[in-house]
Amino acid sequence: MHEMSVALSIVEAVETRAKEEGAGRVSAIDLVVGRLSGIEPESLRFCFSAASNGTIAENAELVIDEREGTGECLECRNRFPVSFYFAECPGCGSMKIAIISGEEFRIQSMTIEEEGE
């Protein structure tokens, strides 16, 4: 399950940044996850719960903003929603498509609390 390695990476990155900021606890983490990223949000939530156990991110709320996939036809420049990498342009029928969004995966922000809060 690759979501576990992703969850562990999130915890590591958040812990590092939170410690730099002098935080005692992380209460929320906002992620952007594209639907074409290969990451299943529910699996990630489950894995994050296990990966954050015993860390300053334990019990942090994991807020996931799922982004739709968008393709652009390289022939007619039409933009349209895609659910996978192979798509046909609904405008001209071309299979020459560039994915322009939906592959994102990033930590957007986190909410930290100082020691003793």
Image (spheres, rainbow, N blue to C red):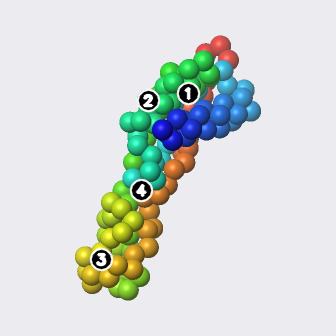
**Of residues 22 and 8, which is closer to you in this image?**
8
Pointers 4 and 3 in contact (C-beta within 8 Å): no
Q: Is residue 17 left or right of residue 86?
A: right
Q: Quadrant of residue 36?
A: bottom left
Q: CA distance from mark 1 to mark 4?
A: 23 Å
Query: x and y percent of residue 9 in the render?
Result: 61, 38
Describe the element under mark 1 as helix, strand or loop.
helix
User: According to the image, label 3 marks what residue?
Assistant: 89
What is the three-letter code of the residue carrying label 2?
Phe
Instruction: Tell me the residue that label 1 is attached to.
Output: 51
Q: Is residue 32 above or below residue 103?
A: above
The CA distance from mark 3 to mark 2 is 36 Å
- What amino acid does circle 4 point to? Leu
Q: Earlier in the sequence, mark 3 or mark 1?
A: 1
Q: Quadrant of residue 84?
A: bottom left
Quadrant, the C terminus? top right
Residue 21 visible within the image: no
User: What residue appears at the point 66 percent right and 30 percent down from the top-left corner?
Assistant: 15
Mark 1, other Cα within 10 Å: few <14 / some 14–19 / many ≥20: many
Residue holding disc 2: 46
Residues marked 3 and 1 touching at CB (< 8 Å) = no
